[in-house]
Amino acid sequence: MSKEHIDRVGIEFYSRWKEFQLKNVASFSQGIQVDPKDQKEVPFDNSVRFIRIVDFTKGTNEELRYIDNPGERYLVEEDDLVMIRYGSQTAGKIARGFKGAIANNTFKISLNEDILNKNFVFYFLSQKSVFDYFHLSQASSTMPAITFDMIGNLDLLVPPIQEQTAIASILSSLDDKIDLLHRQNKTLEQLAETLFRQWFVEEAEESWEVEKLGKVFDIGIGRTPPRKEQHWFTLNPNDVKWVSIKDMGTSGIYIDTVSEYLTPQAVEQYSVPVIPENTVMLSFKMTIGRLAISTEKMVSNEAIAHFKQKEGSSLFPEFLYLFLKTYSWVELGSTSSIVESINSQMIKDIEMAIPDEQKLNTFKDLIKPYFDKIRSNQTQIRTLTQTRDTLLPKLMSGEVRVEM
């Protein structure tokens, strides 16, 4: 194939792509603000579902709250997108699938359906480059917020709608698989929790020995080097993974991805406790009761405790994970206007009824396939997410072409 033919095909391909400013092919309206006391967890007369910023991480209507219906003009329609307006970490995040709900502190984006495919625009606006554009545009603001002008003036390069649909279908198929694996993991974890409650709560035996966690585990607390000494903190994957509560919230049961690292020199200089592989971690400040299991040696900040297995113990990480997962933290929590936390001594004093070794081993054999499958699914999720994130800008720019 000659260079001239390749060039001609390329010109013909890109000539079908058109550039629009978003304001010329979409309309925007602002969501409403609703006092938290007016939000209900169950439906009531004349109520509608209400989208909070926290619901963006779920992406479904399953757990939305309810408010008094403020009127049709606030309702999200089938092909509408919703974008968060405020927040240094959240402004610009985009969501779909909220038909019939009301948006809070967001833009509702209604598209010209003759020109734009909803899912294509969703993925276009999901690109890191778009997110960075919004945040650079508001860098000098004390209260980061996206304006109508910022989103309306965004340049959108799009192919014919049939190609938009095909591109979105490829990305959606990856997202559907990721969502399926997440749901499967949630079900497996719930099954393991149900079995744990049945075996060790409902059918607990009085003969079991009761010990404090501080006696049966070596409990360590993470540490943070001085933040003003920024050279200790890196984004280099070759450095030591440094776990935050936020990382624990996005990782799943097995944590293998973090947003920040410490240099080996920092770990040594500040005697940051090293968390062994296959060790349970627990957040006990700000967000109480968040859990994860390490997949390699790593470290954490001071809001996270870790439980090292003692030599010769019959206890195992998944048993401790399920014990802590089903534990009632409300009884230990203390609340102030600044922080909600429990201290490390309170963790060490938590009492655990320890079954006999035979029962522990039988339970371990029963639930091991659940946890193995969860870990395998998490690996698939990570691979699929990386594939989607690599493909996304290439498909959006036409660098990777879709056969029609």
Image (cartoon, rainbow, N blue to C red):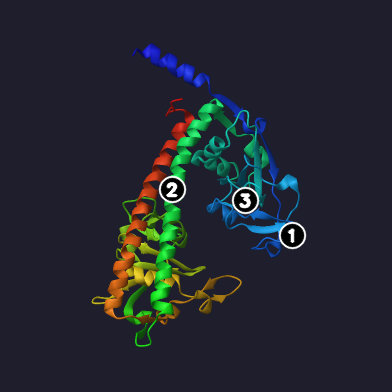
Separation of residues labelled 1 and 2 (CA atoms): 36 Å
Disc 1 residue type (three-letter)? Asp
Query: Disc 3 marks which residue?
Result: 86
Q: Left or right: where does residue 251 sit relative to residue 58?
A: left
**Res. 305 visible in picture:** no
Tell me the element at label 3: loop
Query: Disc 1 marks which residue?
Result: 45
**Considering only order in the chain, which callout, 3 or 1, is on the residue closer to the N terminus?**
1
Q: Which x, y percent locates residue 23?
A: 66, 33
The numbered dot on residue 178 is 2
- Other-residue count near label 3 (Cα within 10 Å), few / some / many at <14 / 14–19 / ≥20: some
Q: Which x, y percent locates residue 100?
A: 66, 48
Looking at this rendering, what residue extends furthest in the bottom direction? 207
Q: Residue at the spot x=63%, y=52% of the render?
A: 143
Q: Between residues 334 and 369, which one lies in front from this camera angle?
A: 369
Tell me the element at label 2: helix
**Considering only order in the chain, which callout, 3 or 2, is on the residue closer to the N terminus?**
3
Q: Nearer the viewer, mark 2 or mark 3?
A: 2
Residue 45 location, quadrant: bottom right
Q: Residue at the spot x=36%, y=56% of the render?
A: 256
Q: Between residues 18 and 374, which one lies in front from this camera angle?
A: 374
Q: Left or right: where does residue 394 sit relative to residue 56?
A: left
Disc 3 residue type (three-letter)? Tyr
Q: Residue at the spot x=42%, y=51% of the render?
A: 181
